[in-house]
């Protein structure tokens, strides 16, 4: 069965693509900073933002492609986002 996108689906997908591009850029900058300075905290910042960015995409993939219930997709993406936030918090507290 082919699913037809509504205007709201297209709007949400567009916003998520912008979030993907910006998140990927932040991950890239943090990783470059890690490589340049050999700073372990920047590696965790990159990991945290990668998880947060990935969670946004996973939510859309679960909902649109796999037709998973929206609530389950939101719970899965929120759990991954929380792990990403913990990685960023760890990077802040592990900095010396």
Image: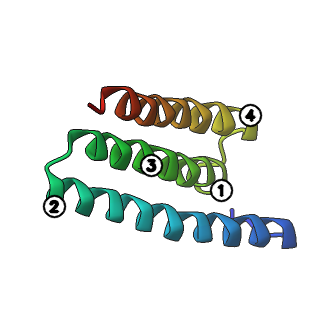
Q: Nearer the viewer, residue 10 or 95?
A: 95
- Residue 94: which quarter of the image? top left
Q: Which residue is mark 2?
A: 36
Q: Are marks 1 and 3 in contact (CB under 8 Å)?
A: no
User: Mark 1 or mark 4, which is nearer the start of the sequence?
Assistant: 1
Query: In percent of the image, x 50 and y 34: which residue is there?
Result: 85
Q: CA distance from mark 3 to mark 4?
A: 23 Å
Mark 4 Cα shell of 10 Å, populated few (<14), some (14-19), many (≥20): few
Q: Are marks 4 and 1 in contact (CB under 8 Å)?
A: no
User: Mark 3 or mark 2, which is nearer the start of the sequence?
Assistant: 2
Q: Secondary structure at mark 4?
A: helix
Q: Which mark is residue 49?
A: 3
Q: Which residue is mark 4?
A: 71
Q: Secondary structure at mark 3?
A: helix
Of circles 3 and 4, the one toward us is 3
Q: CA distance from mark 2 to mark 1?
A: 39 Å
Judged left or right of residue 49, residue 30 is left
In the depicted structure, whether residue 34 falls above or below residue 25? above
């Amino acid at each position: 069965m082919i699913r037809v996108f509504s205007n709201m689906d297209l709007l949400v997908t567009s916003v998520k693509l912008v979030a993907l591009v910006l998140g990927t850029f932040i991950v890239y900058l943090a990783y470059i900073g890690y490589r340049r300075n050999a700073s372990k905290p920047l590696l965790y910042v990159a990991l945290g933002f990668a998880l947060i960015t990935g969670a946004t995409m996973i939510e859309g993939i679960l909902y649109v492609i796999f037709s998973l219930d929206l609530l389950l997709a939101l719970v899965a993406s929120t759990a991954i986002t929380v792990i990403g936030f913990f990685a960023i918090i760890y990077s802040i507290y592990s900095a010396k």
